[in-house]
Image (cartoon, rainbow, N blue to C red):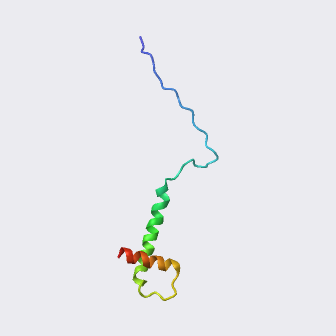
Amino acid sequence: MSAPLHTRPVRPVRPRTGGVADARLHWWVLALPALAFGLLLLLAGSGEAQAAPVHTSPLAQVTQQILRVVG
């Protein structure tokens, strides 16, 4: 006498949509590298903050203000 065989139904394979991945990125995947790049810019320019000419760019002025607040 043989025992009944219980099998799981096979799920159908989802067809691929032209090779396009259906994935969504989290917000921090883009924010963390941008933040790291900004911090590296601040650190790289911190040694030149005192030797900057009188006519500085707006980015350099913002960097100087942040460095005054932080440091």
Q: Quadrant of the N terminus?
A: top left
Query: Which residue is nearer to you in this view: 70 or 45?
Result: 70
Q: Tell me where residue 47 appears, x and y as whole percent.
A: 40, 82
Q: Quadrant of the C terminus?
A: bottom left
Q: Tell me where residue 55 appears, x and y as whole percent.
A: 52, 87
In the rendered view, tell whether residue 24 sits above or below residue 65: above
Q: Tell me where residue 50 appears, x and y as whole percent.
A: 41, 86
Query: How many numbered discs sit on the rendered protein?
Result: 0
In the rendered view, tell whether residue 28 sits above or below residue 67: above
Q: Tell me where residue 21 appears, x and y as whole percent.
A: 57, 49
Give the residue at the far right of this rendering: 18
Query: Which residue is nearer to you in this view: 58 or 2?
Result: 58
Query: Which residue is nearer to you in this view: 44 or 12?
Result: 44
Give the residue at the far left of this rendering: 71
At horizontal 54% and vertical 49% (from top left) the residue drawn is 23
In the rendered view, tell whether residue 17 sits above or below residue 40: above
At horizontal 61% and vertical 43% (from top left) the residue drawn is 16
At horizontal 49% and vertical 89% (from top left) the residue drawn is 54
Give the residue at the far top of this rendering: 1
At horizontal 53% and vertical 29% (from top left) the residue drawn is 10
Query: Which residue is nearer to you in this view: 59 or 23?
Result: 59
